[in-house]
Image (tube, grey):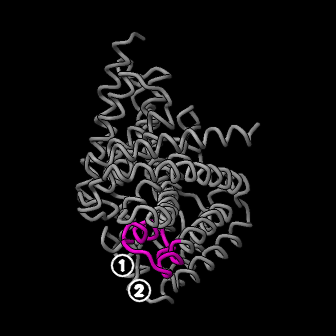
Amino acid sequence: MDKRDNTLGLIIATPVMGVVVGLSSGLLSKWLDLTESLFLHFRENDLMPVATNTSGLRRLLAVLIGAILASLVWYWMQRRYQPVKLKKAVAGETMPFWRTIIHVMTQIFYVGTGGSIGRELAPREAGAMFAQHWERLVDRHPRWRLSGDDRRLLVAAAAGAGFAGVYIAPITGAMFCLEILYQQVSKRAVAVSFTMSAIATLVGGCFKGWQPYYYVSAGAKSFPHSLLPLLILLAPVMGLCGALFRKALQKASDRRASDWRVMVQLPLVGLVTGLVATFFPQIAGNGRGVAQLAMNTHSISEMTIALMFFGFFAKMVVTLLTIKGGAYGGVLTPSIALGSTAGVLLGMLYGLLVPGVSLTQCALVGAVAFLTSSQQAPLMALFMLFEVCHLNFSALLPLCVAAGLSIATSRWFLHRIDH
């Protein structure tokens, strides 16, 4: 097969998969809205990210029942099948259609009931699965058939587009493809990943709207240069913390319950999550509530310090227990929650030396630095916060510095402990 045939196949596949993946991401968003409405009588948005107006008992029962039902589904599914990881899917391992659909819907369902795990893995897995099935379909047409490397690119781009369609973040979706999954930068890869993520964003926006995922006040979107000295302290600390969280996630994932134990461990984790949610509702869900709490912090008080410390440690522990207990889901938004709370705490210390520092901006740069380290993906982390918060261009300088210092520190640290 010549290069022209491969190019023709990509030219056809890219917009088609952009629309398909955008639709699947939009439908998963609606599935989340339906779950939250049924279990919590609540629909989240950037101004109301958690069910604070729902009774504590209802929050407890919602996540407990959700954990029981999700554990039953995952136990049944894993008797004969183990979910395919995205990197293995890019490498060619088959993602079965109906089992993948059940798997991704269960992830969204558990998050919607209050489970402490990210929702972003589900649309990425759905996108990768649809791309694989498209490849099988076009194999019947020689002029549309893709080469091995183009197959990898299409699956990686579709996974990134799944993220873009849910979070309305096209650059982040493309960076997830290029930086984490495909791990190559070429004109071909850039054209496919950016185009597909842009189309998926347009389609997903028809379902979700165009409001920011995290609310940031207008005044906090303009970053002063006086914030830069803080990054010398904050970014390396976040780099170390993010690297430790990454190692903890790997251990929890390696020991994840998948046999009958999931029906015991995951409901217990759901019970713990629900008990915490009775008095701290921000713990529930993917971490949006904890992150928004940090981004809404504007002054220093004993209560604020206590909330940031509790939010950080509670979210970290419950998320790790959720993965160990047998749940599947993303870790990007939990990482943002941890980074934003830690950023506020370090910002409070910095504020003693430089009065007037914006704690919201400390939360944002902390989130970028922590996410960079935990995912080892500085470009994706930088553009994710830039897009989902609708920041302006003045944020790029401090976010770039935070990502750069964080990745350098974390790579050094991870190299030391791995060798």
Question: How many residues crowd around disc 2 within 10 Å: few (fewer than 14), some, or many (20 or more)?
Answer: some
Q: Which residue is mark 1?
A: 42
The question of residue 300 being in magenta is answered with yes
Range of magenta residues? 282-308
Considering the image in quadrants, where does the C terminus appear? top right
The question of residue 287 being in magenta is answered with yes
As rendered, which of 407 and 37 lies closer to the eye?
407
The picture quadrant where one finds residue 253 is: bottom right
Q: Which residue is mark 2?
A: 54
Looking at the rendered structure, the secondary structure element under dot 2 is loop
Q: Is residue 261 left or right of residue 196?
A: right
Looking at this view, name the residue that lies furthest to the front: 353
The picture quadrant where one finds residue 296 is: bottom left
Name the residue rendered at 58%, 36% in the picture.
Answer: 93
User: Relative to 13, is 384 above or below?
Assistant: below
Query: Tag 1: residue type?
Result: Phe
User: Relative to 354, is 10 above or below?
Assistant: above
Q: Marks 1 and 2: in contact by CB < 8 Å? A: yes
